[in-house]
Image (tube, rainbow, N blue to C red):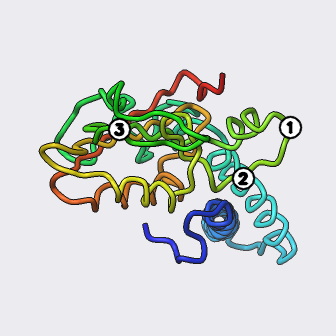
């Protein structure tokens, strides 16, 4: 799913996607309720007609119920299934906590110990890392990291302890050599309080990682039990 550049790398894009999902759920509820009521009326009460206002009331109630259900599904944590976090359902979340971007299944996505270091709050590359771990943090984790201060929802990608926007992450990876003596694997890590895999922050990250070429593979690991560490 591609987002317009206006929404890319911002919290606005995620809000728009979630809002559209809620509106769609409410509309679906209203349509289904109207159809069901009409079918019942035609099948069982052929000599009586349901008043128009009854249609409106039932459709409004159904729209509210479906809208709320969709809201809790897309704004809640965990999977896109009926079982909540990690629950069963027809959602497209990772199976058993891991979704592969390619056929590679490695779970070891941590940078080499000597690959990065911190300097003035920025990551400085000593040697080209062969593996890079990117954590996608949710709003709750970012708020805890901010400690009551201002929260920048666009800086939700954490690499080596540093929060980055998607644009900055792309620039960081662009500078790294790739292939035989460079970057080979990007591991995307989600937690139970991370954005859902179907939403903008994760979707855009996967689309970018999947387009880095054959030399760089990516995997996605979903920890459905633990929240993102912030200590």
From the image, tell me which residue sits under label 3: 126
Q: Where residue 138 sits: x, y (%)?
A: 63, 42
Judged from this view, the residue extending furthest toward the left is 180
Assign the N terminus to one quadrant of the image. Answer: bottom left
Measured Cα–Cα span from mark 3 to mark 2? 28 Å
Res 47 label = none
Tell me the mark number nearer the camera, choosing from 3 and 2: 3
Residue 44 appears in the figure: no
- Mark 2 crowdedness (10 Å alpha carbons): few <14, some 14-19, many ≥20: some
Q: Where residue 79 sits: x, y (%)?
A: 52, 38
Assign the C terminus to one quadrant of the image. Answer: top right
User: Nearest the camera: 155 or 194?
Assistant: 155
Q: Residue at x 51, y 58 (%)?
A: 168
From the image, tell me which residue sits under label 1: 148
Left or right: 52 as drawn, with respect to 169: right
- Mark 1 crowdedness (10 Å alpha carbons): few <14, some 14-19, many ≥20: few
Tell me if residue 172 comes above or below residue 140 in the rendering.
Answer: below
Q: Residue at x 62, y 35 (%)?
A: 193
Q: Residue at x 70, y 51 (%)?
A: 71
Q: Residue at x 72, y 52 (%)?
A: 152
Mark 1 touching mark 3, by CB under 8 A?
no
Element at label 2 = loop
From the image, tell me which residue sits under label 2: 152
User: Nearest the camera: 224 or 205?
Assistant: 205
Measured Cα–Cα span from mark 2 to mark 1? 12 Å
Left or right: 226 as drawn, with respect to 59: left
Measured Cα–Cα span from mark 1 to mark 3? 34 Å
Left or right: 18 as drawn, with respect to 188: right
Tell me the mark number nearer the camera, choosing from 1 and 3: 3
Q: Where residue 148 sits: x, y (%)?
A: 86, 37
Q: Where residue 89 sits: x, y (%)?
A: 46, 39
Element at label 1 = loop
């Amino acid at each position: 799913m591609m987002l317009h550049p206006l929404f890319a790398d911002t919290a606005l894009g995620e809000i728009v996607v979630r809002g559209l999902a809620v509106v769609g759920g409410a509309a679906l509820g209203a349509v289904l309720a109207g159809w069901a009521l009409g079918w019942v009326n035609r099948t069982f009460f052929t000599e009586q007609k349901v008043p128009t206002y009854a249609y409106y009331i039932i459709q409004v109630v159904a729209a509210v119920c479906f809208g709320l259900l969709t809201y809790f599904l897309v704004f809640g944590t965990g999977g896109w299934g009926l079982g909540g976090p990690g629950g069963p359902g027809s959602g497209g979340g990772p199976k058993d906590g891991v979704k592969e971007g390619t056929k590679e299944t490695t779970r070891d996505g941590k940078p080499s110990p000597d690959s990065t270091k911190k300097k003035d709050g920025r990551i400085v590359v000593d040697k080209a890392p062969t593996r890079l771990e990117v954590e996608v943090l949710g709003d709750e984790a970012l708020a805890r990291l901010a400690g009551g201060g201002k929260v920048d929802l666009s800086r939700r990608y954490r690499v080596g302890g540093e929060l980055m926007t998607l644009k900055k992450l792309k620039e960081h990876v662009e500078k790294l050599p790739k292939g035989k003596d460079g970057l080979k694997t990007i591991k995307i890590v989600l937690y139970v309080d991370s954005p859902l895999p179907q939403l903008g922050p994760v979707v855009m990250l996967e689309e970018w990682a999947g387009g880095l070429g054959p030399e760089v593979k990516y995997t996605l690991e979903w920890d459905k039990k633990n929240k993102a560490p912030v200590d």
